[in-house]
Every structure is written in structure tokens, then in C-alpha cells.
Amino acid sequence: MVLYFLSLVLFVMGLYCLVAKKNIVKKIIGITIIEYSINLFLILIGYRRGGVAPILMKDMSVAELVERGVDPLPQALVLTSIVIGLGVLALMVGVCLRLYEKYKTFDMSEINRLRG
Amino acid sequence: MDLFLLILLVFMIIGSVIAIETKNLLSSVISVGVVGFSLSIMFLMLGAPDIAITQMVVEILILVILIRATITTDNTAIERHADTFSVISSLIFFGLFLIFAFLAVHELRPFGEPLMRVSKTYLATSAEKTGATNVVTGILLDFRAYDTIGEATVLFTSVVGAFVILRRRGRKHKRESDTEKVGILEDADIKKDFKGF
């Protein structure tokens, strides 16, 4: 319970950084922290106490793996999510650098002439 | 075990507080690196070695990209504070969010006892159906391979978008060729023509 709640606290801190900060790089950092917290929350939900990694070892039967292995489904989905997060971050940093070239600042309130 | 996870999570929260509140952007990026690497250790503790490895590699790439964004620019620190109204209102709403999250977390299954209705089938049949001893690989590349195709599409789109945004050569070239070869009329020429009529 406490672990779930603390990962949601991490989510809220990333959201605060995304909403209240003026710097664009800070906003990107907030999105990164949100991604981390959501991935951690999904993996925490799939954890089984005393579980082993969902890999079939040589000295282990299938029944034992079913009995002891942690949930592999959130792991597969989080693996997808992490890689997509990297691509989206690269796109965001590209937009951010282009904005800096045009306006010479990272300040969000200075960049108000968004008419193309 | 639980205590170790708790300590790591509190460490991550402290690191993200530093990342959010510090003025210098470079130290903020480094603090995000702290959060990501401790997240990788947590994945390793939670029985997910594949994700731990992926998170490690992706974290290094994120650090490289973010440092590229911050280190070439001159004035990385912004002196102006955010206006107090937005800060206070966002703090109030996020406090409300945390209260509701606290209520909602109690409705979940307790930590350490997941409800594995689908996953038990995956665990039992992965070795004989797909031939993969690593069940996560079996799910990614066989049971839910369409999901992976979608991931590759999203990744391709974002990489193409980043290239289009960041490329420098195409646009200037096109503008010169437009005015010289095709011969678009300037505003003054158009006005002169209309005066002639």
C-alpha cells in the first residue's frame, strides 16, 4: 500500500513540474518523471511476494514457474512503454532546441509569438 | 525486501524534488539520472531483469539527449519565478488528487498478491507454445506481437519527426529555388500589375 501511494506521489510531483514550471526543459523533465512513476506502479502491481523472474531455468519445472513466477504481462507492456518514452523524449528535445534557435530562450512566457 | 524498496522509492522522491526545484538545468538533468538508475535497481529487485537492462540503456540515452539540450545553450537558468497563483492552485488540486489516490489505493489488491488470471496461462504455456524460456520475450514477440508492431510504428514516427524538425538543409534550399526558378511575384509587383489595370 505504502509503495503504491509513494509511486503516485512521484507521479504528482512530475505533474506539478509539468504544470507550474516555466522552463521547457523542466517540463520535459516532469514528463520523464511521470513516465518513471507509471512504469514503476505497473511493475509493483505485478509483483508477487517471494517471486522469481518469469524465466524458465534448467532446474525448474513449468508448474513451479506458474507457482512462483511474477506477473510477466505488465513487464512486457512496460518494456514497450519505456522504448516509446525514449522516442517521444527525443522528439520533444528536438522541438525544444528548434524553439531555442528561434527565440533564444527556454522561458515559456517569452515564447508567445506562436504564429508561425 | 519491502524496507529496501521503500528506501529506494524515498530516495527517488528526494532526487526528483531536487530535479524539480534546482535552478541549474545541468544539475537538474543529473538528478533525473539518479531517479532513473534507482528505478532500474528497483526493477531488478522486483523480479524484472529484462526491464532493468532496458531501463539502464534508455536512461543513459535520455541523459545524453537532455545534456545535449542543456549544455549548448547559454542562459540555462531562468531568474523569474512562476506566478504564485498557478503554483498555489496546482498544489491544492494535486493535494486533492493525492487524497483520492490514497482512498483508491486501498481498493487495489494488497502488495505482493497479484491477480494473475491471464498471466498464469502465459507462464504455463509459453515454453511449449512459443519455445521461449523467457516468458516476457514470448509475450512480446509471439502472444502480443501486434503490440510490438505498434511500438515499432510509434518509434519510427517519432524518429522521423525528430529528423524533420532538426534538419537544417532542406528549407533554405527550397526557398531560393522557389523565388528564382518558379518566379513567384513579390507583393510590389502584384500591386503594380493591378494599378496597370
Image (cartoon, coloured by chain):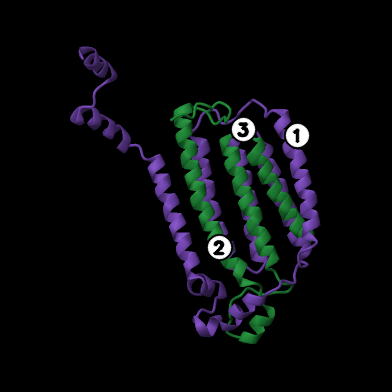
Chain colours: A green, B purple
Q: Nearer the viewer, mark 1 or mark 2?
A: 1
Question: Would residue B146 be found to the left or right of residue B89 on screen?
Answer: left
Quarter placement of the C terminus of chain A: top left
Q: The residue marked by circle 3 belongs to what chain?
A: A
Q: Residue at x 42, y 52 (%)?
A: B157
Label number found at residue B88: 1
Q: Residue furthest front?
A: B197
Q: Are marks 1 and 2 on the same chain?
A: no
Q: Amino acid at mark 3?
A: Lys
Residue B47 vertical position relative to residue A14 in the rendered view, above or below: below
**Residue A110 appears in the figure:** yes
- Which of pointers 2 and 3 lies earlier in the amino acid sequence? 3
Q: Residues within 10 Å of mark 1 (few under 14, many from 20)?
A: few
Q: Is residue B149 left or right of residue B17?
A: left
In this rendering, the answer to whether B147 lies above or below A107 is below
Amino acid on which the number 1 mark rests in the picture: Ile
> Which three-letter amino acid code belongs to the residue tagged 2?
Leu
Q: Which residue is mark 3?
A: A22
On screen, A46 above or below B125?
A: above
The residue at 72%/56% (across/down) is B8
Q: Name the residue beneath numbered marker 2.
A: A79
**Mark 2 belongs to which subunit?**
A
Q: Is residue B75 left or right of residue B86?
A: left
Mark 2 vs 3: CB contact within 8 A: no
The reply to whether label 3 and label 1 mark residues of one chain is no
Query: Residue A13 — which label?
Result: none
